[in-house]
């Protein structure tokens, strides 16, 4: 693992972005029981010493024309060895142990946050970021004093950086058993 992971880490350094808006199943459901779609774009930066920064912009529509929120996460990646999804893929745990911030980009989203995530926060307002790092944040299932973590994977093929595809039933990557088994749409080098 050491040589493969070392080469991947070296090749991954720098900035990566979504090719186009992406769709994921969310954990939320529509009235008919189907999963609500989650539309987003990603911007990822991998630093030496296994540090990362991730910015996600969540949108109300599949084309990214109506942004709802910006989420910024910073922390460390912990490499856990080969993943069987593809030769050279690696199991990686992403831990947000440095920063986690949410910025409402639409009034409707700020209004929702003011109803469901007001305790311990200033009033939520459009374009006003707030740190949720280490705090309870019900909309994302975060508990005070706990760092957000995902059991994910990384696969680098040329100038394409893949992570794991979301589970089709909306489950998060919150346990080793929920670690992804497929690849999602790749990021491209910026």
Image (spheres, rainbow, N blue to C red):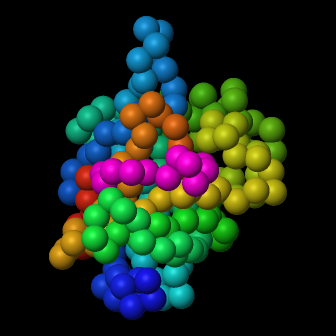
Report if residue 52 is visible in the image.
no
In the displayed structure image, the side of residue 4 where residue 30 appears, left or right: right
Residue 142 in the magenta stretch? The answer is no
- Residue 114 vs 102, above or below: the answer is above
Between 183 and 86, the one nearer to me in the picture:
86
- Name the dominant secondary structure of the magenta segment: loop
Residue 29, can we see it?
Answer: yes
Image coordinates for residue 159, horizontal then vertical, percent:
19, 74
- Residue pictured at 53% horizontal, 72% vertical: 80
Of residues 70 and 54, which is closer to you in this image? 54
The quadrant the N terminus occupies is bottom left
Q: Position of residue 86 (x, y in %)?
A: 28, 64
Q: Is residue 92 above or below residue 57?
A: below
Q: Relative to residue 101, is residue 95 depicted above or below? A: below
**Quarter of the view holding residue 68:** top left
Residue 182 colored in magenta in the image: yes
* Residue 146: % across, % down: 76, 56
139 relative position to 8: left or right: right
Instruction: Tell whether 68 sits left or right of 157.
Output: right
Chain part drawn in magenta: 174-184
């Amino acid at each position: 693992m050491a040589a493969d992971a070392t080469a991947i880490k070296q090749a991954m350094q720098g900035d990566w972005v979504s090719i186009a808006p992406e769709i994921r199943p969310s954990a939320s459901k529509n009235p008919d029981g189907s999963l609500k779609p989650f539309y987003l774009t990603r911007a990822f930066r991998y630093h030496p010493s296994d540090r990362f920064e991730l910015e996600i912009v969540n949108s109300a529509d599949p084309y990214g024309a109506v942004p709802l929120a910006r989420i910024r996460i910073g922390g460390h990646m912990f490499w856990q060895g080969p993943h069987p999804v593809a030769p050279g893929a690696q199991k990686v745990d992403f831990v947000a142990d440095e920063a986690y911030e949410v910025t409402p980009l639409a009034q409707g989203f700020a209004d929702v946050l003011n109803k469901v995530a007001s305790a311990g926060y200033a009033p939520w307002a459009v374009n006003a970021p707030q740190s949720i790092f280490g705090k309870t944040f019900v909309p994302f299932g975060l508990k005070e004093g706990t760092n957000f973590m995902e059991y994910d994977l990384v696969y680098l093929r040329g100038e394409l950086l893949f992570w794991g595809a979301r589970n089709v039933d909306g489950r998060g990557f919150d346990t080793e058993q929920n670690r992804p088994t497929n690849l999602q749409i790749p990021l491209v080098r910026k």
